[in-house]
Amino acid sequence: MAAKIELETGGTVWKLMVAEGDKVSAGQTLFIMEVMKMEVPYEAPVDGVVADLKIAEGDVVEEGMAALVVR
């Protein structure tokens, strides 16, 4: 089952911890956002493979944007 990771708030992609095609485990940090000088980690909700990566380090992103999919 695919899990689409959508951004809960706007900000800047501070650190990308995975690349497209990487295997991930539920709870693993995928990327870290900088939001109002705070670091906000996003974790994989399920085990799977990173697909459809739509963000890169330094990107300024908006709330609701799809960041990636874990399949």
Image (cartoon, rainbow, N blue to C red):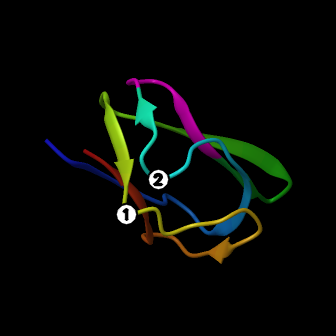
User: Quarter of the image holding residue 29?
Assistant: top right
Bin the neighbour count of mark 2 within 10 Å (Cα to Cα): few under 14, some 14-19, many 20 and up.
some
34 versus 47 height, above or below: below
Indicate yes or no whether the magenta region holds residue 29. yes
**Which residue: 76% across, 44% down?**
39
**Viewer-closest of 44 and 22:** 22
Check residue 26 in the rendering and tell me which mark sits there, or answer none.
none
**Viewer-closest of 33 and 1:** 1
Q: Are marks 1 and 2 in contact (CB under 8 Å)?
A: yes
Bin the neighbour count of mark 1 within 10 Å (Cα to Cα): few under 14, some 14-19, many 20 and up.
some
Where residue 54 sits: x, y (%)?
A: 48, 69
Q: Secondary structure at mark 1?
A: loop
Residue kind at label 2, given as amino acid type: Glu
Q: Secondary structure at mark 2?
A: loop
Residue under label 2? 20
59 versus 42 height, above or below: below
Residue kind at label 1, given as amino acid type: Asp
Residue under label 1? 52
The quarter of the image holding the C terminus is top left
Magenta part of the chain: 25-31
